[in-house]
Image: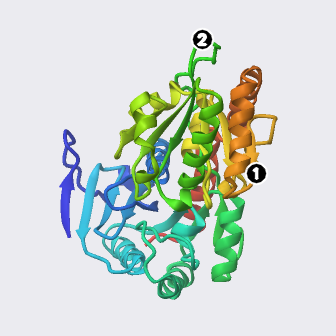
Amino acid sequence: MHIYLIPNSQPNQFSNSDADANRISGVMICVPARSGMRGGAYSVAEDIAWEITRRNIRVYFASFNTQILMIQDYTTKRFVTHSLRFRYAAIGILVLYLKSLRINILHCHLDVAFIAASSASLAGIPSVRTIHGRLNRPGMLAWQEKIAFRLAVSVLQQRIIAVSNQVMVDIVNAYNLSPQINVFEIPNGVYLNLPQSQEYTSQKQLTFIFVGRFEKFKGFKELISAFTKVYSQYPHIQLHLVGDGQEKHLIDPQLVASGAIIVSEGWQPRSIVREYIRSSHIFVLPSHSEGLSVALLEAMAIGLVPIVSQAANAYNIVENHVNGCVFSTQSSEQLQECMRFLASSPQYLATYRVAARATVAKNFSMERCIDRHVALYQQIINNTPRY
């Protein structure tokens, strides 16, 4: 085990003094991160960790992928990094739990809250992607993860936080867990004070934006097909693609050369992605499977109109023709209809964008999210004896 300090931070040793007694108990927030890319789940988990620390709860933040397991104490600003190469994601998860147990012994009592970003990242269900972004013997991975999670919940008494009701149902069914005992639903939250996008006017190009991996399970093929056909009818529209992936060859170079498609390839800082979103008008989420998209919530908070698939787990967020448009999963034709409708009837954009922001402000603010986390963590800490 090696200790690293965050740049510009001061060494801060663990203390057993009376002044530090109220921070002896704490929680660990764990989130899977794809190798070489920090997605929305990782970013929002970092936000949650910082906000909870500000409320005088000791927080450890752990992330892991196929290359590395990283644990950071957000209270003392220390990194605890253990480099291991994992053949299977489940082994990484298991090592993470053993690592958290070691911190229990060395430093303080620690209850773990695992933020489950999606069914794919947690449940190891066959035919879905693993936490490190590859299909890697799903059957093998399923039973390995099942053992790891059963150990985590039954032996280490860890709590699992699901970001949506569907994810919670998937977890409960996959591992025979008890809702409100082992698994809790706390939706993601986003900041509401983000700079707003400008309303669309007929003198501008109507910009659709996609943020994510250019891969099959993200609905990338359907998106490219739908946009190409709609663009042939409405040349005032534009598509901004932010990300990277195996299906980037589907992008027509001629549409890129003409400016109809803009590609911002590779990992982008959150501040840059938010600027891309703010300069757009319509956010497209055509995923075949999704937990609760942070990019979607931020886009709606910024003032974009969403187009989402039915599998995007946004059924309680986006209401068809009220604050956005919803289409059947993997249906390029229905996605075309949504894009064509908004391209041909821009007068609905102003109404939808106001309704979209109101939805996020009411149900998915960062403050509301943190309140629910803190209430759960305080309950765990108060009901657990200290060592």
Number of numbered callouts drawn: 2
Check disc 1 and report its element: helix, strand or loop: loop
The quarter in which the C terminus is drawn is bottom left
- In the depicted view, which residue is nearer to us: 276 or 171? 276
Q: Nearer the viewer, residue 16 or 46?
A: 46
Whether residue 62 is visible to the viewer of this picture, yes or no, is yes
Q: Earlier in the sequence, mark 2 or mark 1?
A: 2
For this view, does 177 lie left or right of residue 252? right
Report helix, strand or loop for mark 2: loop
Mark 2 to mark 1 CA distance (whole Å): 33 Å
Residue behind mark 2: 203
Q: Which residue is mark 1?
A: 315
Could you tell me residue 311's position as x and y percent? 68, 58
The front one of 120 and 265 is 265
The image shows residue 343 at horizontal and vertical percentages of 68, 28
Amino acid type assigned to the residue bearing label 1 in the image: Tyr
Q: Residues within 10 Å of mark 2 (few under 14, many from 20)?
A: few
Picture layout, residue 201 above or below residue 235 = above
Residue type at mark 2 is Gln
Q: Quadrant of the N terminus?
A: bottom left
Q: Is residue 262 visible?
A: no
Q: Residue at x 71, y 30 (%)?
A: 342
- Where, by quadrant of the figure, is residue 167 drawn? bottom right
Residue sitting at 76 percent across and 34 percent down?
323
